[in-house]
Image (spheres, helix red, strand yellow):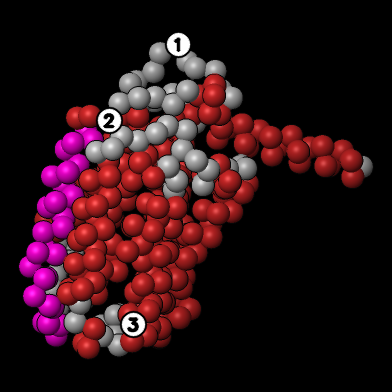
Amino acid sequence: MQAVESSVQQEQQSKWRQFWDRGGWWKALLVAAVYYGLYQLAGFLIGLAFGDAIDKHDVLANGLSVFIAIAASILVGSILLVLFALSIGWLKELFARQPIRGSWWMWIGVAIVVVFNILRFASVDYAGWDAGAVVAVLFTGLCVGFAEEVLTRGFAVNLLRRGGYGERSVMLLSSLIFAAMHSGNVLSGQNPIAVAFTVVYTFAFGIVMYVTLRVTGNLIWPILLHASTDPSLILLTGGVDASSGTLHPGPLAGIAGLANYAVMIFAIIPIIFVRGRVDRADAYGLVEPAAKLA
Protein backbone atom coordinates (compact mmCIF):
# COMPACT_ATOMS: atom_id res chain seq x y z
CA MET A 1 0.00 0.00 0.00
CA GLN A 2 2.78 2.40 0.91
CA ALA A 3 4.58 1.54 -2.33
CA VAL A 4 1.43 2.41 -4.34
CA GLU A 5 1.01 5.72 -2.50
CA SER A 6 4.67 6.52 -3.07
CA SER A 7 4.32 5.76 -6.79
CA VAL A 8 1.26 8.02 -7.06
CA GLN A 9 3.07 10.86 -5.28
CA GLN A 10 6.08 10.51 -7.58
CA GLU A 11 3.80 10.59 -10.63
CA GLN A 12 2.05 13.73 -9.35
CA GLN A 13 5.40 15.39 -8.63
CA SER A 14 6.61 14.45 -12.10
CA LYS A 15 3.51 16.00 -13.75
CA TRP A 16 3.88 19.12 -11.59
CA ARG A 17 7.50 19.54 -12.68
CA GLN A 18 6.75 18.73 -16.32
CA PHE A 19 4.05 21.40 -16.35
CA TRP A 20 6.55 24.11 -15.38
CA ASP A 21 9.44 22.66 -17.38
CA ARG A 22 7.57 23.36 -20.63
CA GLY A 23 7.57 27.09 -19.84
CA GLY A 24 5.46 29.79 -21.46
CA TRP A 25 4.69 33.49 -21.01
CA TRP A 26 1.38 32.91 -19.25
CA LYS A 27 3.06 30.69 -16.68
CA ALA A 28 5.54 33.48 -15.94
CA LEU A 29 2.59 35.83 -15.48
CA LEU A 30 0.80 33.26 -13.32
CA VAL A 31 3.77 32.84 -10.98
CA ALA A 32 4.06 36.63 -10.59
CA ALA A 33 0.32 37.02 -9.94
CA VAL A 34 0.22 34.23 -7.34
CA TYR A 35 3.35 35.58 -5.65
CA TYR A 36 1.89 39.10 -5.54
CA GLY A 37 -1.37 37.82 -4.05
CA LEU A 38 0.38 35.76 -1.38
CA TYR A 39 2.72 38.65 -0.59
CA GLN A 40 -0.25 40.96 -0.07
CA LEU A 41 -2.00 38.33 2.06
CA ALA A 42 1.12 37.88 4.18
CA GLY A 43 1.33 41.63 4.71
CA PHE A 44 -2.31 41.76 5.76
CA LEU A 45 -1.98 38.88 8.23
CA ILE A 46 1.29 40.22 9.67
CA GLY A 47 -0.38 43.61 10.11
CA LEU A 48 -3.26 42.02 11.99
CA ALA A 49 -0.95 40.07 14.28
CA PHE A 50 1.84 42.58 14.88
CA GLY A 51 0.46 45.91 13.67
CA ASP A 52 0.89 47.49 17.11
CA ALA A 53 4.66 47.37 16.59
CA ILE A 54 4.42 49.67 13.55
CA ASP A 55 4.96 53.37 14.18
CA LYS A 56 1.77 54.89 12.75
CA HIS A 57 3.39 58.30 12.24
CA ASP A 58 6.57 57.04 10.55
CA VAL A 59 7.01 53.36 9.63
CA LEU A 60 10.73 54.05 9.19
CA ALA A 61 11.15 55.37 12.74
CA ASN A 62 12.82 52.25 14.18
CA GLY A 63 14.02 48.81 13.19
CA LEU A 64 11.02 46.83 14.46
CA SER A 65 8.57 49.12 12.68
CA VAL A 66 10.47 48.77 9.40
CA PHE A 67 10.66 45.00 9.73
CA ILE A 68 6.97 44.48 10.52
CA ALA A 69 5.64 47.07 8.07
CA ILE A 70 7.86 46.26 5.07
CA ALA A 71 10.39 43.46 5.41
CA ALA A 72 8.35 40.67 7.01
CA SER A 73 5.91 40.12 4.13
CA ILE A 74 8.74 40.20 1.57
CA LEU A 75 10.68 37.69 3.68
CA VAL A 76 7.63 35.40 3.62
CA GLY A 77 7.44 35.84 -0.15
CA SER A 78 11.13 34.94 -0.48
CA ILE A 79 10.60 31.75 1.49
CA LEU A 80 7.61 30.81 -0.65
CA LEU A 81 9.66 31.32 -3.82
CA VAL A 82 12.40 29.03 -2.50
CA LEU A 83 9.82 26.36 -1.60
CA PHE A 84 8.28 26.64 -5.07
CA ALA A 85 11.72 26.30 -6.69
CA LEU A 86 12.40 23.20 -4.59
CA SER A 87 9.02 21.70 -5.52
CA ILE A 88 9.85 21.80 -9.25
CA GLY A 89 13.57 21.10 -8.87
CA TRP A 90 14.72 24.49 -10.13
CA LEU A 91 16.57 25.99 -7.16
CA LYS A 92 20.02 24.92 -8.34
CA GLU A 93 19.16 25.74 -11.95
CA LEU A 94 18.08 29.30 -11.11
CA PHE A 95 21.50 30.03 -9.62
CA ALA A 96 23.48 28.08 -12.20
CA ARG A 97 25.66 29.67 -14.88
CA GLN A 98 23.55 31.45 -17.50
CA PRO A 99 23.05 29.48 -20.74
CA ILE A 100 23.76 32.56 -22.87
CA ARG A 101 26.61 35.05 -22.55
CA GLY A 102 26.48 38.83 -22.38
CA SER A 103 28.25 41.51 -24.42
CA TRP A 104 30.86 43.96 -23.14
CA TRP A 105 28.57 47.00 -23.40
CA MET A 106 26.21 45.46 -20.83
CA TRP A 107 28.76 46.32 -18.14
CA ILE A 108 27.79 49.97 -18.66
CA GLY A 109 24.38 49.27 -17.14
CA VAL A 110 25.96 47.53 -14.17
CA ALA A 111 28.36 50.45 -13.67
CA ILE A 112 25.54 53.02 -13.77
CA VAL A 113 23.64 51.31 -10.95
CA VAL A 114 26.77 50.70 -8.86
CA VAL A 115 28.05 54.28 -9.17
CA PHE A 116 24.72 55.92 -8.38
CA ASN A 117 24.07 53.58 -5.44
CA ILE A 118 27.48 54.52 -4.00
CA LEU A 119 26.66 58.21 -4.49
CA ARG A 120 23.35 57.79 -2.69
CA PHE A 121 24.85 55.89 0.24
CA ALA A 122 27.58 58.55 0.48
CA SER A 123 24.95 61.31 0.60
CA VAL A 124 22.75 59.82 3.34
CA ASP A 125 22.22 61.87 6.50
CA TYR A 126 22.88 58.94 8.84
CA ALA A 127 22.62 61.20 11.90
CA GLY A 128 18.93 61.67 11.10
CA TRP A 129 18.27 57.93 11.20
CA ASP A 130 17.74 55.49 14.04
CA ALA A 131 20.55 52.90 13.86
CA GLY A 132 18.13 49.99 14.09
CA ALA A 133 16.07 51.45 11.26
CA VAL A 134 19.17 51.63 9.04
CA VAL A 135 19.92 47.95 9.65
CA ALA A 136 16.28 47.04 9.01
CA VAL A 137 16.19 49.05 5.76
CA LEU A 138 19.34 47.26 4.55
CA PHE A 139 17.80 43.89 5.45
CA THR A 140 14.60 44.89 3.68
CA GLY A 141 16.65 45.70 0.58
CA LEU A 142 18.20 42.25 0.67
CA CYS A 143 14.73 40.67 0.88
CA VAL A 144 13.44 42.83 -1.97
CA GLY A 145 16.45 42.06 -4.13
CA PHE A 146 16.13 38.34 -3.53
CA ALA A 147 12.37 38.06 -3.97
CA GLU A 148 11.95 40.31 -7.00
CA GLU A 149 15.01 39.04 -8.85
CA VAL A 150 14.31 35.36 -8.20
CA LEU A 151 10.75 35.97 -9.38
CA THR A 152 11.43 38.03 -12.51
CA ARG A 153 15.03 37.37 -13.57
CA GLY A 154 14.81 33.84 -12.22
CA PHE A 155 11.44 32.20 -12.77
CA ALA A 156 10.08 34.56 -15.44
CA VAL A 157 13.26 34.50 -17.55
CA ASN A 158 13.52 30.73 -17.21
CA LEU A 159 9.88 30.15 -18.14
CA LEU A 160 10.12 32.45 -21.15
CA ARG A 161 13.31 30.80 -22.39
CA ARG A 162 11.77 27.37 -21.92
CA GLY A 163 8.80 28.62 -23.93
CA GLY A 164 11.14 29.24 -26.86
CA TYR A 165 11.20 33.03 -26.82
CA GLY A 166 14.17 35.00 -28.16
CA GLU A 167 16.24 37.00 -25.69
CA ARG A 168 14.80 40.39 -26.64
CA SER A 169 11.32 39.10 -25.88
CA VAL A 170 12.57 37.45 -22.68
CA MET A 171 14.05 40.77 -21.59
CA LEU A 172 10.98 42.86 -22.47
CA LEU A 173 8.33 40.47 -21.13
CA SER A 174 10.13 39.78 -17.83
CA SER A 175 10.65 43.54 -17.37
CA LEU A 176 6.97 44.21 -18.11
CA ILE A 177 5.98 41.69 -15.43
CA PHE A 178 8.41 43.36 -13.03
CA ALA A 179 6.95 46.80 -13.80
CA ALA A 180 3.34 45.60 -13.61
CA MET A 181 3.92 44.34 -10.06
CA HIS A 182 4.74 47.92 -9.00
CA SER A 183 1.54 49.33 -10.50
CA GLY A 184 -0.22 47.92 -7.43
CA ASN A 185 1.26 50.81 -5.43
CA VAL A 186 -1.71 52.89 -6.53
CA LEU A 187 -3.92 50.70 -4.31
CA SER A 188 -1.98 51.88 -1.25
CA GLY A 189 -2.97 55.48 -1.93
CA GLN A 190 0.11 56.66 -3.81
CA ASN A 191 -0.28 59.42 -6.37
CA PRO A 192 -1.22 57.83 -9.74
CA ILE A 193 1.27 60.07 -11.57
CA ALA A 194 4.05 58.98 -9.22
CA VAL A 195 3.01 55.35 -9.71
CA ALA A 196 3.05 55.79 -13.50
CA PHE A 197 6.61 57.14 -13.31
CA THR A 198 7.55 54.24 -11.01
CA VAL A 199 6.19 51.74 -13.55
CA VAL A 200 8.23 53.30 -16.37
CA TYR A 201 11.34 53.38 -14.20
CA THR A 202 10.93 49.81 -12.95
CA PHE A 203 10.51 48.59 -16.53
CA ALA A 204 13.83 50.27 -17.39
CA PHE A 205 15.42 48.98 -14.18
CA GLY A 206 14.20 45.48 -15.04
CA ILE A 207 16.00 45.74 -18.37
CA VAL A 208 19.21 46.75 -16.58
CA MET A 209 18.83 43.79 -14.19
CA TYR A 210 18.34 41.45 -17.16
CA VAL A 211 21.53 42.90 -18.68
CA THR A 212 23.29 42.33 -15.34
CA LEU A 213 22.10 38.71 -15.33
CA ARG A 214 23.48 38.20 -18.84
CA VAL A 215 26.86 39.88 -18.45
CA THR A 216 27.68 38.53 -14.96
CA GLY A 217 26.35 35.08 -15.79
CA ASN A 218 24.63 34.42 -12.45
CA LEU A 219 21.41 35.47 -10.71
CA ILE A 220 23.23 36.34 -7.48
CA TRP A 221 24.61 39.57 -9.01
CA PRO A 222 21.32 41.22 -10.01
CA ILE A 223 20.02 40.20 -6.57
CA LEU A 224 22.89 42.02 -4.83
CA LEU A 225 22.70 45.01 -7.16
CA HIS A 226 18.96 45.31 -6.63
CA ALA A 227 19.43 44.77 -2.88
CA SER A 228 21.61 47.88 -2.69
CA THR A 229 19.36 50.06 -4.84
CA ASP A 230 16.16 50.35 -2.78
CA PRO A 231 17.93 50.94 0.57
CA SER A 232 20.17 53.63 -0.92
CA LEU A 233 17.07 55.49 -2.15
CA ILE A 234 15.09 55.05 1.08
CA LEU A 235 17.97 56.09 3.32
CA LEU A 236 18.73 59.13 1.17
CA THR A 237 15.16 60.44 0.97
CA GLY A 238 13.49 58.98 4.04
CA GLY A 239 11.01 57.23 1.76
CA VAL A 240 10.53 55.96 -1.78
CA ASP A 241 8.62 58.83 -3.35
CA ALA A 242 9.84 62.12 -1.91
CA SER A 243 12.55 63.63 0.23
CA SER A 244 11.94 63.93 3.93
CA GLY A 245 12.12 67.39 5.45
CA THR A 246 13.90 66.00 8.51
CA LEU A 247 16.88 64.69 6.56
CA HIS A 248 19.76 66.75 5.22
CA PRO A 249 21.47 64.89 2.33
CA GLY A 250 25.13 65.47 1.50
CA PRO A 251 26.46 67.58 -1.39
CA LEU A 252 26.43 64.64 -3.83
CA ALA A 253 22.68 64.14 -3.44
CA GLY A 254 21.89 66.28 -6.48
CA ILE A 255 24.01 64.08 -8.73
CA ALA A 256 22.67 60.92 -7.06
CA GLY A 257 19.16 62.14 -7.84
CA LEU A 258 19.84 61.64 -11.55
CA ALA A 259 20.06 57.86 -11.11
CA ASN A 260 16.54 57.04 -12.33
CA TYR A 261 17.00 59.08 -15.51
CA ALA A 262 20.38 57.47 -16.22
CA VAL A 263 18.82 54.01 -15.89
CA MET A 264 15.93 54.89 -18.21
CA ILE A 265 18.24 56.35 -20.85
CA PHE A 266 20.57 53.35 -20.78
CA ALA A 267 17.61 50.94 -21.07
CA ILE A 268 17.10 52.12 -24.65
CA ILE A 269 20.39 50.47 -25.69
CA PRO A 270 19.45 46.86 -24.78
CA ILE A 271 16.05 47.30 -26.42
CA ILE A 272 17.89 48.01 -29.68
CA PHE A 273 20.85 45.65 -29.45
CA VAL A 274 19.88 42.56 -27.43
CA ARG A 275 19.83 39.51 -29.66
CA GLY A 276 20.10 35.75 -29.37
CA ARG A 277 18.11 32.76 -28.25
CA VAL A 278 18.82 30.01 -25.76
CA ASP A 279 19.08 26.56 -27.35
CA ARG A 280 16.38 24.72 -25.40
CA ALA A 281 17.73 21.31 -26.34
CA ASP A 282 21.18 22.14 -24.93
CA ALA A 283 20.05 24.14 -21.91
CA TYR A 284 16.95 22.23 -20.80
CA GLY A 285 16.74 19.07 -22.87
CA LEU A 286 13.63 20.40 -24.64
CA VAL A 287 13.00 20.17 -28.38
CA GLU A 288 12.86 23.50 -30.20
CA PRO A 289 9.38 24.46 -31.54
CA ALA A 290 8.99 25.04 -35.25
CA ALA A 291 8.45 28.77 -34.74
CA LYS A 292 8.27 31.15 -31.82
CA LEU A 293 8.11 34.87 -31.25
CA ALA A 294 11.65 36.25 -31.54
Is residue 210 something one can see in this rendering? no
Left or right: 228, with 46 as reference point? left
Q: Residue furthest front?
A: 104
Q: In the rendered structure, which amino acid carries the disc numbered 1?
A: Ala
Left or right: 209, with 256 as reference point? right
| Residue at the image position 14 percent from the left and 85 percent from the top | 246
Quarter of the image that includes the N terminus = top right
What residue did someone put label 3 on? 133
**61 drawn magenta:** no
Identify the secondary structure beneath mark 2: loop
C-alpha distance separating marks 2 and 1: 22 Å
128 is higher (above) or lower (below) than 155? below
Q: Residues within 10 Å of mark 1 (few under 14, many from 20)?
A: few
Contact, mark 3 vs mark 1 (Cβ under 8 Å): no
Q: Closer to the N terminus: mark 2 or mark 1?
A: 2
Q: Residue furthest right?
A: 1
